[in-house]
Amino acid sequence: MKHIWLGVFTLLAAPAWAQSVTFVDKDGYAMGPGTWTCEKAISIAMEDGGSDKSALIGWILGAWSFSTFAREPAYSDVIEDVGGQAIYVETIRRCQSAPPDEILHVVVRAMVDNTGVE
């Protein structure tokens, strides 16, 4: 059931950010908020709400959720224990310490790679 709601959310939220697609490497690409600079992501994170903030939260949690499919169960356990709110807050905090023109998906990828758990 969670997967159905995630799909519905993705379809409904897509028009808000689907215009921007950036190719990252030969194996994939980032789109939507994943292509935003940290400066833009931080600005939107500080807002009270709105579709851009919802898209930002959804993208960050989706990226972290997706990362669990390529790793061992211990990694998934850590992500589940930490929880979505803490992951979102830490991702924005890492963006705040990154250069303003750093791209959000690069920050998230570095965080995933540095979790210390496979």
Image: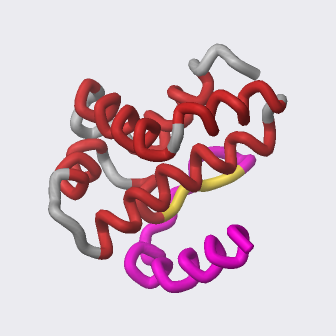
Colour basis: secondary structure
Quarter of the figure with the N terminus = bottom right
Picture layout, residue 2 above or below residue 94: below
Q: What residue is at 49 percent from the left and 58 percent from the top?
A: 59
Quarter of the figure with the C terminus = top right
The answer to which image quadrant residue 81 occupies is top right
Along the line of sight, which residue is nearer the eye, 33 or 10?
10
16 inside magenta stretch: yes
Q: What residue is at 61 percent from the left and 82 percent from the top?
A: 8
Residue that protrudes farthest toward the front in the picture: 81
29 inside magenta stretch: no
| Number of numbered discs overlaid on the protein picture | 0
Q: Is residue 71 left or right of residue 106?
A: right
Q: What residue is at 22 percent from the left and 57 percent from the top?
A: 44
Picture layout, residue 58 above or below residue 7: above
Q: What residue is at 41 percent from the left and 57 percent from the top?
A: 57
Residue that protrudes farthest toward the top in the picture: 116
Residue 16 location (% of width, % of height)? 38, 79
Magenta part of the chain: 1-27
Along the line of sight, which residue is nearer the eye, 76 or 95?
76
Residue 65 location (% of width, % of height)? 64, 48
Residue 67 location (% of width, % of height)? 68, 41
Q: Is residue 88 left or right of residue 11?
A: left
The answer to which image quadrant residue 6 occupies is bottom right
Q: Is residue 71 left or right of residue 84?
A: right
Residue 76 location (% of width, % of height)? 72, 35
